[in-house]
Amino acid sequence: MSDYILETKHLFKEFRGFVAVSDVNLRVRRGSIHALIGPNGAGKTTCFNLLTKFLTPTSGQIYFAGHEITHEKPAQIARRGIIRSFQISAVFPQLTVLENVRIGLQRATGQSYHFWRSDKALSHLDQAAYALLEQVDLAEFASELTVNLPYGRKRALEIATTLAMEPELMLLDEPTQGMGHEDVSRVTALIKKVSVGRTILMVEHNMNVVSQIADTITVLARGAVLAEGDYQEVSRNADVMQAYMGTTSGELEGAHA
């Protein structure tokens, strides 16, 4: 078995002559937290959309767990275990926190869309749902309507719902965007906690978050890989500094992509 769960080879994406992703060779190691960063317009979201098959590459290949998935559909790769947080974990505001996680757990039962079933028919999922809520420190909010949760807690619930889908690879798209300092710290610690035994690929603007939890960082600029390594390596890279801040001195500490 390869050390790498996800690989791209010479990935390109063009939009009417504009190259949004250019020759990206990405390798995500099993059991790691891998961050994809870069200035605005660097191609991060386009790259995520290629990996989750919401876009089709102009050329290049994508491999997951040794299988080529370049031409598979989003539902196919979700069944393989690639789960992108904001796609499948959009919370239902008028359901309770517990009920939201239970919907995620229904996938494994083959009854994902049986919304007409009585709550009692789903009660056998409650224990597993509570266990997931405990993982993300939401057990005390189990009976709370989701609409009443603060923003940071809603993001924690999205992560719980994602975990309910039993992902092999979690793709988190800017998980701390729009949060205050306290929520950022809580969600950062949560991502680190749930990463044990899992693989996470994340796009994240907050460099303080990336510096704390990312094992490997890939820096994109103008659609191409500019640098790769751990935080110490990329934060001192002159090309990265130029791309982010228009300077070749200092470090990225505290910078925002």
Image: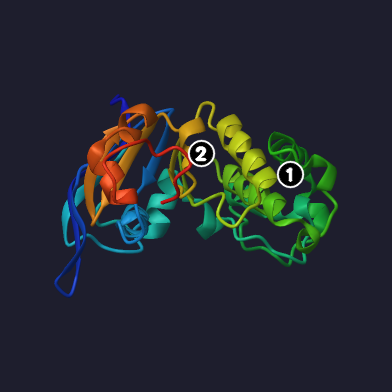
Q: Is residue 91 left or right of residue 65?
A: right
Q: In the rendered image of this protein, does residue 204 appear above or below residue 249?
A: below
Q: Quadrant of the N terminus?
A: top left
Query: How many callouts does the rendering have?
Result: 2
Q: CA distance from mark 2 to mark 1?
A: 37 Å
Return the residue nearer the eye: 220 or 75.
Answer: 220
Image-quadrant location for residue 191: top right
Q: Secondary structure at mark 2?
A: helix
Look at the numbered disc 1 and give the secondary structure of its residue: helix
Image spot of residue 22 (x, y percent): 17, 54
**Label 1, residues with CA under 10 Å away: few <14, some 14-19, many ≥20:** some
Numbered badge on residue 125: 1
| Residue occupying image coordinates x 32% and y 60% | 46
x and y percent of residue 144 in the render?
Answer: 84, 55
The answer, for residue 69, to whether it is visible in the render is no
Q: Which mark is residue 208?
A: 2
Q: Percent x, y for residue 101?
A: 69, 50
Q: Is residue 146 above or below residue 172?
A: below
* Residue at image coords 24%, 38%: 238
Query: Dot 2, crowdedness within 10 Å: few (<14), some or many (≥20)?
Result: some
Q: Residue at x 31, y 25 (%)?
A: 3
Residue 213 drawn at (x, y percent): 50, 32
Specify whether 105 is left or right of 138. left
